[in-house]
Image (cartoon, rainbow, N blue to C red):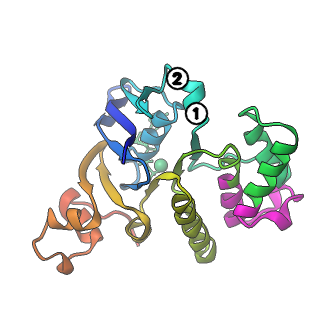
């Protein structure tokens, strides 16, 4: 296995407030890497810096062993980012939304048409291809948001809370699709504050709080940091012990 992504001392400050604090993480090819943390922990800011949407105050990102800033165009084409805030356009039809994003990567003509159909089919929206995105339910919008990030066939997929505010059926559908993408060869970074989702799909988890990674490992390794007998503790309790906080209010 080789390292696909490495952050070096990645830091973001807004004014005097440090929101991401000296982050050093390495993600291996083929992983489903979970970034778990409460509201305001710095998860989205970290993802945004990895995708070069937010400029780091300090530090850098290396992707396939290359500096992201110096090889931006090449590296962006290998990255699929599914943002927390929906990035679809209500006044465009489903297929036009996918076209808009996929064509940014220089894909044209018959190949573009094929990629649009393939992406919509992947998220189960073929029947809704010609419908305007503004008429979609929350779950359908989330699925379209994912389709928009797939058309250029990225090898690293970054999902920032893709299941927020949607029904259980759509949530399960999205979780299955993430697993399927991983089986098909994509490396995945997944941020959430749903413990059970992270536990179900992630090969390794980083717990983030106040801009810092406070623990990193497999579910079993994280539990071992707190107790000897791991059958006696849930990931939720590990989080509470390590941070003194509840992950979310139920
Ligand atoms: N553009 C900005 N200007 C000022 N502060 C910001 C900005 N963007 C984010 N922050 C602050 O940075 C901190 C981390 O925010 P971020 O969105 O990364 O957290 P998060 O872990 O993704 O939270 P959530 O689970 O709510 O999505 C928060 O305190 C937030 O208010
Ligand atoms: Mg966020």
Q: On the image, numbered disc 1 is attached to which residue?
A: 76
Give whichever of 52, 26 is nearer the camera: 26
- Residue 144 falls in image quadrant: bottom right
Q: On the image, numbered disc 2 is attached to which residue?
A: 71
Q: How far apart are marks 2 and 1 (CA)?
A: 8 Å
| Residue at 45% from the left image edge and 34% from the top image edge | 63
| Image location of residue 234, percent across then percent down | 26, 74
Q: Are marks 2 and 1 in contact (CB under 8 Å)?
A: no
Q: Is residue 101 above or below residue 37?
A: above
Q: Circle 2: is it few (<14), some (14-19), or many (20+) Cα within 10 Å?
A: few
| Residue 130 is one of the magenta-drawn residues | yes
Main SS category, magenta section: helix
Q: Can residue 164 be seen in this view?
A: no
Region rendered in magenta? 121-146
Quick one: which residue is furthest to the bottom in this view? Answer: 232
| Image location of residue 20, percent across then percent down | 34, 37
| Residue at 41% from the left image edge and 64% from the top image edge | 198
> Which sits earlier in the primary sequence, circle 2 or circle 1?
2
Q: In which quarter of the image is ligand 1?
A: top left
Give whichever of 11, 96 is nearer the camera: 96
50 displayed left or right of 38: right
Disc 2, ligand 1: is the CB inside 8 Å? no
Q: Which mark identifies residue 248?
A: none
């Amino acid at each position: 296995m080789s390292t696909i992504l490495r952050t070096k001392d990645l830091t973001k400050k807004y004014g005097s407030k440090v929101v991401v604090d000296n982050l050093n993480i390495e993600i291996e090819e083929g992983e489903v890497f979970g970034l778990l943390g409460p509201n305001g922990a710095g998860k989205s800011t970290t993802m945004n810096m990895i995708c070069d949407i937010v400029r780091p105050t300090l530090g850098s990102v290396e992707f396939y062993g290359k500096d992201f800033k110096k090889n931006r165009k090449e590296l962006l084409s290998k990255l699929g980012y599914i943002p927390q805030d929906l990035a679809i356009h209500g006044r465009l039809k489903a297929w036009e939304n996918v076209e808009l994003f996929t064509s940014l990567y220089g894909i044209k003509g018959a190949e573009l048409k094929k990629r649009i159909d393939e992406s919509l089919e992947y998220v189960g929206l073929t029947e809704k291809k010609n419908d305007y995105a503004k008429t979609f339910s929350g779950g359908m919008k989330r699925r379209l948001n994912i389709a928009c990030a797939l058309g250029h066939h990225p090898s690293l997929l970054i999902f920032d809370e893709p299941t927020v505010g949607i029904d259980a059926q759509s949530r399960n559908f999205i979780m299955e699709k993430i697993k399927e993408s991983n089986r098909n060869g994509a490396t995945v970074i997944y941020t959430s504050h749903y413990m059970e989702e992270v536990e179900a799909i992630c090969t390794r988890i980083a717990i983030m709080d106040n801009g810092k990674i406070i623990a990193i490992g497999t579910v079993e390794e994280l539990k071992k940091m707190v107790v000897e007998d791991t059958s006696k503790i849930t990931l939720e309790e590990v989080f509470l012990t390590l941070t003194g906080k509840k992950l979310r209010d139920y």
